[in-house]
Every structure is written in structure tokens, then in C-alpha cells.
Image (spheres, grey):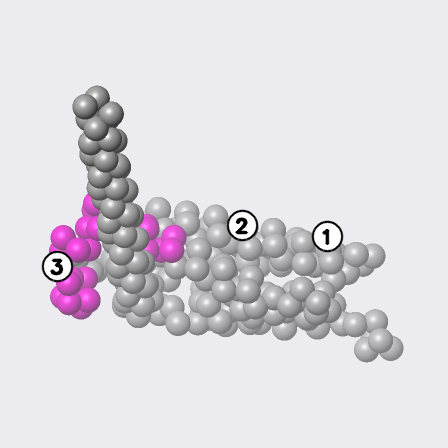
Amino acid sequence: MNAGSGDVHERAGDVRERRRADGRRREDGRRHEDGRRRDELIDRLITLFLERGFADLGIADMAAVLRCSKSTLYTVAPSKEQIIVTVVRAFFRRATARVEARLDAGADPRDRLAAYLRAISDELGPASPAFFADLTDFVPTREVYRQNTLIAAGRVRRLVREASPAGDAAFVGAVAGLVMESIHSGEIRAATGLADSAAYAALADLIGARMTRPEQAG
């Protein structure tokens, strides 16, 4: 009698554990699906912001363009300002990953340096003047852009050192960093009329011309 009772309790415990495991799997599946939908929504918001900017877009405007509810937008972040910052951060994070993915580890360091700057140019290419204006005018997004520019400038300095270990890498790297800061701040745009994307392409050409291969220099 006692043995049979123990078997019943053991089977009941097994059933409860299976139910808990099933519940955890369902919850994990829901979280995964919610994350996927949120990522897709951020992708669509990135496209919208790049095309139209974001300062003049209210939550209702975003919902109308994306054909979703306002509550769906709030799954990205709890306020318009936080949604904007989240989307801008995602844009730069994903752009950085794509830029790095384009670098060929086996290529000539000079080619890698040029490829890096041109990849940045390509990533910024779809951004409208309205996007850059809003990016600069809104302090939190301006800071996101500044931080990403500082990181990219550091990456360029490392690539310059790899490309010209015995040359004037420190000078070239410093100049590149200063130009990148000026692009970010809008000074290059104001002085030359070049959009940020075009300015990065011009910087790639400038550094490429300065760091001509030795066999081409004579």
C-alpha cells in the first residue's frame, strides 16, 4: 500500500515537472517571438527615420506610417524620446556590424583602411538631411553619434598603424580623427556642403592618396 502510494506521488511529481517544463518552453517561445517582432519594428523605424527624420514625428504619426498600434510602438521603449534613442542606437550598432563584416582580414592594410571608411560612407548614404539635422539637434542622439564617431576614429587610427607602422601613422590617424569629429559636428557639412556620407568617401580618397603603396611612389 505504501509502495503504491509512493508510485502515485512520484508520477504526480513527474506530471507537475513536465507541465512546468512545457510552461517554460512556451514562455521562452513567446519571449523569442516578442523579441523578433520588436527587432522588425526597430528595422522599420530605422528606415522611417533615415527617410524623414524623427523630430516632427509623433507616436501617432509613426503608428500610421508603420500601420501598427501605438501600444505596439511602446514595446520598443516607454516614451517617444526613448523610442528615438533606442532606434538611433540600433542603427549605429547594426551599421557598425556591417562595416566590420566588410573588412577582409587578409587584404592589404591600406585597402582595409579605405574599405572601412567607404563602408561608413555607404551606411550613412541612405540618411536624409532631415535625419542628420534631427540627430544633431536632439542632445541624446547627438551623443550617440558622437560616441560612435569616437569609436570609429579609434578604429581608423589602429588601421592606419597597421597600414603604415613605420610611417607617419600618428599624424595621419590624428588628422583622420579630427576630420571625423568635424563630420559629426556638422562643420564639414557647413564648410563644404558635403553630406556626411560624401565626406567619409572623400576622407577615404584623401587618406588613400596619402598612403600610397611604396611600389607606386617612385
Overall secondary structure of the magenta section: helix
Q: Residue furthest right?
A: 218
> Which secondary structure, mark 1?
helix
Which residue is label 1 attached to? 170
Query: Label 2 is placed on what type of residue?
Result: Leu
Residue 7, position in %: x, y? 24, 31
Q: Is residue 141 above or below residue 207?
A: above
Q: 20 above or below 114?
A: above
Q: Earlier in the sequence, mark 3 or mark 2?
A: 3
Residue bearing mark 2 = 150
Residue at screen point 35% across, 69% down: 128
* Image position, residue 195 (x, y; %): 45, 69
Q: Residue at x 27, y 56 (%)?
A: 33
Quarter of the picture holding the N terminus: top left
Was residue 63 drawn as part of the magenta stretch in this picture?
yes
Q: Nearer the viewer, residue 121 or 177?
A: 121
Q: Is residue 2 visible?
A: yes
Which quarter of the image is occupied by the C terminus?
Answer: bottom right
Classed neighbour count for the residue bearing mark 1: other residues with Cα under 10 Å, few (<14), some (14–19), many (≥20): some
Describe residue 4's horizontal placement relative to residue 159 as left or right.
left
Q: Depth-wise, is mark 1 or mark 3 nearer the camera?
A: 3
Q: Secondary structure at mark 3?
A: loop
Residue range (magenta): 61-90
**Mark 1 → mark 3, Cα distance in angstroms:** 52 Å
Q: Earlier in the sequence, mark 1 or mark 3?
A: 3
Q: Quick one: SS at disc 2?
A: helix
Would you identify the image quadrant in which residue 19 lies?
Answer: top left
Q: Which residue is mark 3?
A: 69
Magenta stretch containing residue 1, yes or no?
no
